[in-house]
Image: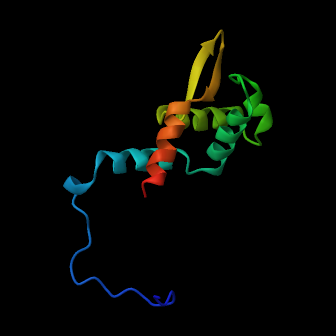
Amino acid sequence: MEDQNQTCKPCEQDSTIPVSQISPSDEALAKLAWAIAHPARVKLVRLLLERSACVCGELVELMPLAQSTVSQHLKILKDAGIVQGEIDGPRVCYCVNIAGLARLKALVAEL
């Protein structure tokens, strides 16, 4: 059994991975991980998962953040494909993009 307190030996060679060796799934995981990397965005996803229908204005009331900040976080999640939004009159209603969340889970599971 390895000693868990053992330190790593310094690399004798440059350990930088060439961009040509970065796979599309690595890039996808990095994009999705960045989108979920803020506690407010994690909370928004959790709130949306708790709802059975799309949510419009109430997300702002449930978050201790300004409306513009919540909107920016939702935009990041939407751009990454983790949530989706539908225009309902003057509002946008959001829900979790099940396929996008499943993709995130699958990519993390591959680590």
- Above or below — where is 37 with respect to 64? below
Q: Residue at x 42, y 54 (%)?
A: 110
The quarter of the displayed image where residue 98 is located: top right
Q: How is the image coloured?
A: rainbow
> Horizontally, is 19 left or right of 61 in the view?
left
Between 16 and 9, the residue placed more toward the observer is 9
In x, y percent, where is residue 107?
Answer: 44, 48
- Above or below — where is 32 with respect to 85? below
Q: Residue at x 71, y 24 (%)?
A: 55
- Above or below — where is 15 with respect to 97? below
Q: Residue at x 80, y 33 (%)?
A: 61
Q: Could you tell me which quadrant the C terminus lies in?
A: bottom left
Q: Residue at x 77, y 43 (%)?
A: 64
* Extreme-top residue of the structure: 89
Between 75 and 14, the residue placed more toward the observer is 14
* Extreme-front residue of the structure: 1
In x, y percent, where is residue 75?
Answer: 55, 32
In x, y percent, where is residue 85?
Answer: 58, 22
The quarter of the displayed image where residue 13 is located: bottom left
The tally of labels here is: 0
